[in-house]
Amino acid sequence: MMTKTKRLVTGAFMLALGMVLPFVTMQIPLLGVMLSPMHIPALLTGFLCGPVLGLLIGFLMPLLRSVLFGMPVFYPNAVSMAFELATYGFVSGFIYHRYKSQNIKKVYITLLLSMLLGRIVWGVTRVIMLNVAHTPFSWQIFITDGFIRAVPAILLQLILIPLILDRLDQAHILPYR
């Protein structure tokens, strides 16, 4: 079991990673949108630290990055991302830590549910925020921005996160050991 201190340090590391990873893709903005670099540490925080820290780190990450570096744009992007990434962190932590034993199938189930629910929360948040601003947000925009344009990011997350968790398992440093 991971101690409270280890969870906090791991959460802080994931927050820092979320601040740094977008610098890798910032030279080509379309690449950053396609790969969604902040999503990976938000999901990992839930897997490694549990639902509460996953929610907190996921929510703070885009807001803090927006305030510190100006990207993503605070409203509506960083605000809607905050709710999306908070959902990723919470759901991945909540589902994954409910299993008595973990395996690759459970990782993928958790990951897919987290990503689906996170994107739904992102869409609902956008609808609410943009309706207040009298800006249209249609189903076509939701499907295109939330799923079609996100295919490279979804594939990257489905490859990287199980690989990272497997390596951490082999090193005997996952929270359930």
Image (cartoon, grey):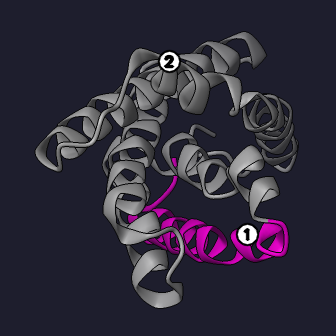
The numbered mark at residue 152 is none
Residue at point 81% right, 29% down?
155
Tell me, yes or no, whether the highlighted magenta stretch contains residue 168: no
Tags 1 and 2 touching, CB below 8 Å: no
Q: Residues within 10 Å of mark 2 (few under 14, many from 20)?
A: few
Magenta highlight: main SS? helix
In the rendered image, is residue 101 in sight?
no
Under circle 2, the secondary element is: helix
Q: Amino acid at mark 2?
A: Gln
In the rendered image, is residue 30 in sight?
yes
The numbered mark at residue 140 is 2
Q: Which residue is tagged 1?
A: 21
Residue at point 87% right, 44% down?
167
- Extent of the magenta region: 1-28
In the image, residue 27 sits, relative to residue 139, either above or below, namely: below
Residue at point 28% right, 29% down?
124
Residue at point 46% right, 38% down?
88
Between discs 1 and 2, the one toward the N terminus: 1
Tell me, yes or no, whether the highlighted magenta stretch contains residue 3: yes
Q: CA distance from mark 1 to mark 2?
A: 29 Å
Q: Residue 143: image x %, image y %?
A: 54, 19
